[in-house]
Amino acid sequence: NRERTIPLHPEVRTILQRLWLASSKKGKEQFVFVTNNGLPFSNRTLHKVVVRSSERARVKRITFHGLRHTFATIIANSHGVEKACILLGHSDIKITMMYYHADQTVLQNVIINQ
């Protein structure tokens, strides 16, 4: 339940800013995704939106938790577990390791390139 600030790709930032500016449901805070009252969506509502969106797209069921695991793995494989730990907001790298799933291709390349 801690607030975290993470860097965003400039294109993502631009898209989110455009969505916020176009929204007619602005609250006191600058949340992009809000209820009709301008309040931020609850975690439960966001979870439902992501799951339903994956179902509509006819892809494997996606959850926020699954996206977090994917993010941890991509960052750890490309930039190291330490950077993933920082971006995930973990105080202990052991927690990050619970989210990290070693990419078999990356592991194979380690063996081949020795």
Image (cartoon, rainbow, N blue to C red):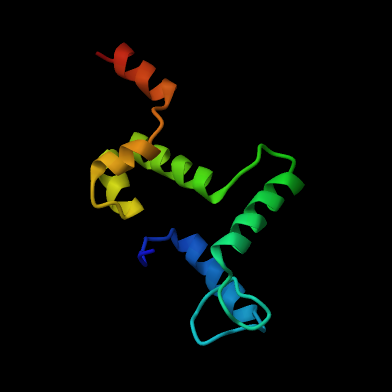
Q: Quadrant of the C terminus?
A: top left
Residue at the image position 58 percent from the left and 70 percent from the top: 41
Q: Quadrant of the N terminus?
A: bottom left
**How many discs appear?**
0
From where the camera sits, is residue 78 visible?
A: no
Residue at the image position 64 percent from the left and 76 percent from the top: 35
Horizontally, residue 34 falls left or right of residue 90, namely right
Is 99 placed above or below 9 here? above
Residue 98 in percent (x, y) is at 36, 37
Residue 21 in percent (x, y) is at 59, 80
Is 103 placed above or below 47 here? above
Residue at the image position 76 percent from the left and 48 percent from the top: 56
Horizontally, residue 73 falls left or right of residue 55, namely left
From where the camera sits, is residue 84 visible?
A: yes
Instruction: Identify the image quadrant of residue 78.
Output: top left
Residue 30 in percent (x, y) is at 50, 79
Q: Foreground: 95 or 80?
A: 95
Q: Foreground: 6 or 100?
A: 100
Horizontally, residue 74 falls left or right of residue 95, namely right
Is 113 placed above or below 101 here? above
Instruction: Identify the image quadrant of residue 72.
Output: top left
Residue 82 in percent (x, y) is at 24, 43
Residue at the image position 68 percent from the left and 80 percent from the top: 36
